[in-house]
Image (cartoon, helix red, strand yellow):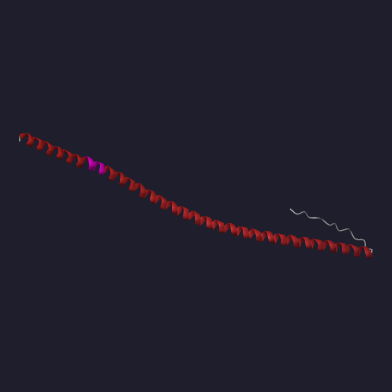
Amino acid sequence: MEKLKDLALGVILLIGVLALYQVFVTNSNLRAALKTLDGTKKKLDSASSEIRYSKIQVDSLQQNFVRFGAYLQDVQGRLERLDLEKRITDQSFASKKDSIKVRLKELNKIVDLTGQDLPEVRIIETKKP
């Protein structure tokens, strides 16, 4: 009977030690896991914040690209208009120059027909840049 009591006491003691082991070791593992999860949550929150900040920057860049595209289209339109005006001006100048040449030839013929002695008017060709 004594042996049975000693054996029962040993089993109860063993169960108590196992219970304490479970409480301290398992809880410390759980605490470590909770700390790891908490650290991971903080990192995820930080990453989320950085992603939001990056999204704001990307949106800002996109708006700047849209503005710059509109600016480039405006410049392109102005350049096309200036080019067209230059071509029209050049064409007008060429037609006026041709008209003056024809008129000079006519005047030279008239002077030749009248027999008057006038100095020759030189025609200077202009070079286009």
Q: Where does the magenta region start and end?
A: 25-30
In the image: residue 100, left or right of residue 3:
right
Q: Residue at x 44, y 53 (%)?
A: 55
**In front: 9, or 36?**
9
Q: Residue furthest top?
A: 3
Report how many numbered discs are placed on residues in the image. 0
Q: For residue 28: magenta?
A: yes
In the image: residue 128, left or right of residue 16:
right
Q: For residue 15: magenta?
A: no
**In front: 111, or 119?**
111
Measuring from the top left, give residue 22's x and y in whole percent: 20, 41
In the image: residue 80, left or right of residue 27:
right
Measuring from the top left, give residue 19's x and y in whole percent: 17, 41
Q: Residue furthest left?
A: 1
Secondary structure mostly seen in magenta is helix
Measuring from the top left, give residue 77's x and y in whole percent: 62, 60
Measuring from the top left, give residue 83's x and y in whole percent: 68, 59
Quarter of image, res 56: bottom left
The answer to whether 120 is drawn above or below residue 7 in the figure is below
The answer to whether 13 is drawn above or below residue 62 in the figure is above
